[in-house]
Amino acid sequence: MVIILDRDGVINQYRGQYICSLDEWLPLPGSIDAIGRLCRAGHRIAVATNQSGLARGYYREDTLNAMHQRLTALVQAAGGSIACIAYCPHHPDDGCACRKPRTGLLERIQSGLGLPSLSGSLMIGDSRKDLLAGRQAGCTSYLVRTGNGIETERHLRRRPLPGVAVFDDLQAVADHLLGTAAA
């Protein structure tokens, strides 16, 4: 199965402020291990992330690439790999096709991985826009309570998205998918 992850708030810490430097990019506890476990079980991992901080001038593309290189190295050290990273560099007002909740990033992943569709794939995010992008692209969507997830869960009580499973974090999703109990 292809598992598509949002980045900020799912893989790394996110407290509502832009991650503007390599020093600010800090993995959430258990997230790298979870990705490694999922890879070792045969799943392919991709990342789809909105990065409007580029358009806003908060950081440069070389800084974003350094963050993704660190992510890739940490996942490799945990016995996994990232098959594809797709990011939207646009400002929310640009009206691009790639910014979630639109499906452009997921379509880029689908093409990059040579998949006929994303049906049967999983999208894991901490925001409604992640969940909507996944659903619109044919994925099953899971919400994690890290990052913006607790607030998103509150909003889902008022405006439900049927079929969205909710987990504490990426480690709990891995435990669920792999049929293991949390330690």
Image: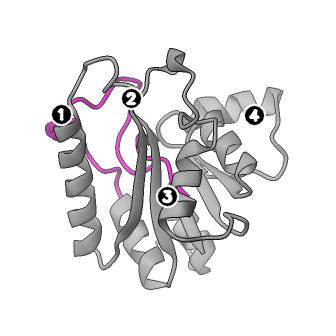
Identify the residue position indicated by label 3 in the image. Answer: 170
Amino acid type for the residue under numbered disc 1 = Ser
**Label 2 – label 4 distance at C-alpha:** 20 Å
Residue 138 visible, this orientation:
yes
Q: Is residue 68 left or right of residue 10?
A: left
Looking at numbered disc 3 in the image, what kind of residue is underneath it? Answer: Leu
Q: Whole-Å distance between the Cαs marked 3 and 1?
A: 23 Å
Q: Which residue is mark 2?
A: 15
**Image position, residue 72 (x, y; %):** 27, 62
Question: Where does label 4 land, which residue?
Answer: 156
Disc 4: CA contacts within 10 A as few (<14), some (14-19) or many (>=20)? some
Structural distance between the alpha carbons of marks 1 and 4: 32 Å
Q: Which residue is mark 1?
A: 21
The crowding category of the residue bearing disc 2, from other C-alpha atoms within 10 Å (few below 14, some 14 to 19, many at least 20), is: few
Looking at the image, residue 68 sits to the left or right of residue 111; the answer is: left
Along the viewing direction, whichever of 31 and 122 lies nearer the viewer: 122
Give the x, y percent position of residue 154. Answer: 70, 30
Q: Marks 3 and 2: CB-CB under 8 Å?
A: no
Which sits earlier in the primary sequence, circle 1 or circle 4? 1
Tell me which secondary structure the magenta stretch mostly adopts: loop
Q: Position of residue 181 (x, y in %)?
A: 56, 75
Query: Horizontal placement of 150 versus 53: left or right?
Result: right
> Residue 13 in magenta?
yes
The amino acid on which the numbered mark 4 sits, given as a three-letter code, is: Leu
* Colouring rule applied to residues: one colour
**Residue at (73, 49) in percent of width and height:** 135
Q: Secondary structure at mark 3?
A: helix
The residue depicted at 49 percent of the width and 84 percent of the height is 41
Pointer 2 or 4: first along the chain: 2
- Disc 1 to disc 2, C-alpha distance: 14 Å
